[in-house]
Amino acid sequence: MKTYRKALFVVCVSAIVSLAGCSNKPVASTINEQATLTGPLPYNPLAWRVITSSVNEHKATMSTLYGNDVAVAYARANEGRPYPSGSVIALVTWSQRDDPHWFGARIAANAQAVEFVSFPSAAGVSPAYERYEGAPLARVAANEGDVKRIDYLVSQRAAVTP
């Protein structure tokens, strides 16, 4: 009989302790809504898979290179050019801010730029480059540095994942 009472006591204490932790206070959102992409983008790169990422401590920015399924499969199996036709890659660059949930960590803040490189199916046609900046993101006119940006984006090697 003593074993039954001990078991009942443990169950009651466990129930009281677990209910004491409950409250009606709202839980802080863990979704980083500040880092969302707004504006008329031709694609949603955040729905794609990551090819690689980087941090620029000097500029306090972080960037992620995304790719559609064709681009990601190619990037993980090959290096450099040419991406196959139908590939689209996008570099999203955010400013950084302190993570309110993790001391010392930095997370994405506002999007600064989104760059797209798409590889057409026609032979001999150069890749298309588009850049979006601002809030909301808006397309920026082409300039002389676009070819260098294409070369830079295409040269990024895929991160090795375990």
Image: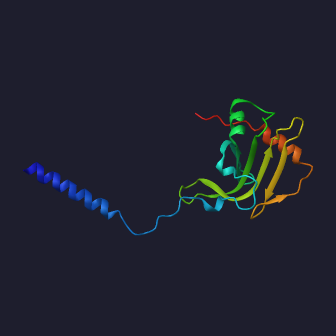
For the residue pair 40 and 12, the one nearer the viewer reads as 40
Residue 24 spot, x, y in % from top left: 40, 69
For the residue pair 127 and 156, the one nearer the viewer reads as 127
Quadrant of the snapshot with the C terminus: top right
Task: Give the residue displayed 55% in from the left and 56% down from the top.
Answer: 103
Task: Give the residue displayed 47% in from the left and 64% down from the top.
Answer: 27
For the residue pair 157 and 136, the one nearer the viewer reads as 136
- Pick out the residue farthest to the bottom: 24
Q: Quadrant of residue 50?
A: top right
- Pick out the residue farthest to the front: 122
Residue 16 spot, x, y in % from top left: 26, 62
Q: Quadrant of residue 18?
A: bottom left
Residue 126 spot, x, y in % from top left: 88, 40
- Pick out the residue farthest to the left: 1
Task: Give the residue displayed 64% in from the left and 34% down from the top.
Answer: 160
Q: Is residue 83 above or below residue 12?
A: above
